[in-house]
Image: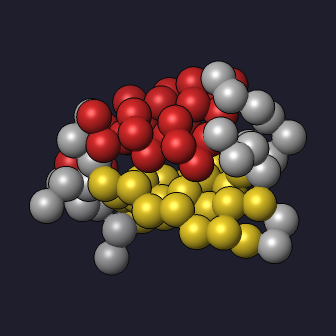
Amino acid sequence: MARRLELDIRGQICPSCLLLTLKAINEEAEALRRGEAEIVVTTDDRQATATIPAAAERMGYHAEVASLDEGYRIRVFGGR
């Protein structure tokens, strides 16, 4: 089972949301690629639901977005 890294960035707005997530992706790049880790971002910035998945996918990862009562959850995980 993949290690889950939770990143709660509610209250932040893009580009800060994107930059914080990219930092986490870069720090966990090898584990993400191997499927040993995933990053779960909780945000209330709607723009982040477009910018984070687009950036993650350009880097070769997958991203899923889910709507929550208090915002959004974006899951970034390794390529298969």
**Which residue is at the front of the view, 5 or 66?**
66
Q: Quadrant of residue 3?
A: bottom left
Give how far across and how far down residue 50 sits, in percent. Answer: 53, 43
User: Residue placed at 54% from the left, 57% from the top?
Assistant: 74
Left or right position of 20 against 61: right
Left or right position of 26 against 67: left
Give how far across and how far down residue 67 sits, in percent. Answer: 66, 69
**Which residue is at the front of the view, 39 or 56?**
56
User: Residue placed at 76% from the left, 31% from the top?
Assistant: 13
Give how far across and how far down residue 10 sits, in percent. Answer: 80, 47
Q: Quadrant of the C terminus?
A: bottom left
Residue 36 shows in the view = yes
Q: Quadrant of the N terminus?
A: bottom left
Q: Quadrant of residue 2?
A: bottom left
Judged from this view, the residue extending furthest toward the left is 80
User: Residue placed at 57% from the left, 25% from the top?
Assistant: 19
Residue 40 shows in the view = no
Give how far across and how far down residue 38 sits, in percent. Answer: 41, 58
